[in-house]
Amino acid sequence: DVKVTQSSRYLVKRTGEKVFLECVQDMDHENMFWYRQDPGLGLRLIYFSYDVKMKEKGDIPEGYSVSREKKERFSLILESASTNQTSMYLCASKDPAGPEAFFGQGTRLTVV
Amino acid sequence: EDQVTQSPEALRLQEGESSSLNCSYTVSGLRGLFWYRQDPGKGPEFLFTLYSAGEEKEKERLKATLTKKESFLHITAPKPEDSATYLCAVGGSNDYKLSFGAGTTVTVRA
C-alpha cells in the first residue's frame, strides 16, 4: 500500500513564526502536492512538484514556499505564519502514469 | 479553469435509506473524475476513478456514474459506517493537479 506520512497531526504556532510541514511518501512517486482544506471551500492547491527540485505554484501560493530536495520528501514552508493560515494541510503523492492521488493524514495547523 | 460543484452540502439519512450525491463539473479535456471518502480529522481516501461518460464503478454500497457534465455517487441501503464527507475531483488537461469540490457530508443514523 502507498503510504504518505505527514510529520505532525496537530501544530500550534505563533504569528510571525517560520513553520515547516514535512511529507514523506514511500512509493517512489514523481508527483507530490500540498493542499489546504477549509470548511465550505474544499481542497485548494498550494504548490505541486512534478520531480525533484521542480515546483510549480498552485491556486493559492501566497505566503508559502516549498522544497523538494529528495524524491520522497516534499516540504511546505510558511515564511511568516499568520492567523489566516490556520487550516488543515494535506500532502498527496501520485504516479504520473496512474490516475489517483494518495493523501497523508493531514496536519491541523493553528496560528495564534 | 476547472470547476467542481457538489450538492447537497450535507445529507442526513436513516439507515437503509438510499440516496444520491451530485458532482457537476466543467473541465478542459477530462482525464478522470475521482471520488474520495474523508473521515473527520483524516486525509481523503481514494474510492473510484471514472474516465468517460457512461462508465460506472461499484464498491460495496457505493456506485459512481458519469455523464459529460456530472457524476453521481449512489449510496444503497447505507449503514452508520458510511457516514463521512465524500469529495469529488477532476483531473483536466493539466495532468498534475486535481480540482476538488467542497464535498458532501453524509450522516447515517441507526
Image (cartoon, coloured by chain):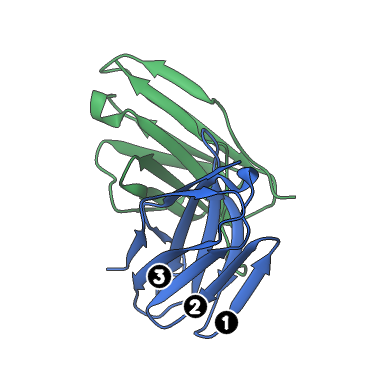
Labelled disc at residue A54: none
Report the residue at 26% width, 36% height from top. Answer: A63
Can you see residue B2?
yes
- Disc 3 marks which amino acid? Asn
Query: Given contact means CB atoms under 8 Å apart, are the residues at marks 3 and 1 in contact?
Result: no
Q: Colour of chain B?
A: blue
Label 1: few (<14), some (14–19) or many (≥20) C-alpha neighbours in 10 Å: few
Closer to the eye: label 2 or 3: 2
Query: Which badge, 2 or 3, is on the more N-terminal residue?
Result: 2
Report the residue at 54% width, 48% height from top. Answer: B14
**Observer-nearest of A94 and A70:** A94
Q: On what subunit does the disc labeled 1 rest?
A: B
The part of the image, by quadrant, that contains residue B58 is bottom right
Q: Colour of chain A?
A: green
- Disc 2 marks which amino acid? Leu
Query: Which badge, 2 or 1, is on the more N-terminal residue?
Result: 1
**Observer-nearest of B11 and B110:** B110
**Observer-nearest of B79 and A37:** B79
Q: Quadrant of the C terminus of chain B?
A: top right
Secondary-structure class at tag 1: loop
- Disc 1 marks which amino acid? Glu
Query: Which badge, 3 or 1, is on the more N-terminal residue?
Result: 1
Q: On what subunit does the disc labeled 3 rest?
A: B
Q: Which residue is mark 1?
A: B55
Where residue A57 appears, as percent x and y from the top left, is 33, 52
- Residue under disc 3 on the same chain as residue under disc 1: yes
Q: Which residue is mark 2?
A: B66
Q: Which residue is mark 3?
A: B94
Marks 3 and 1, how far apart in space?
22 Å
Report the residue at 54% width, 78% height from top. Answer: B51
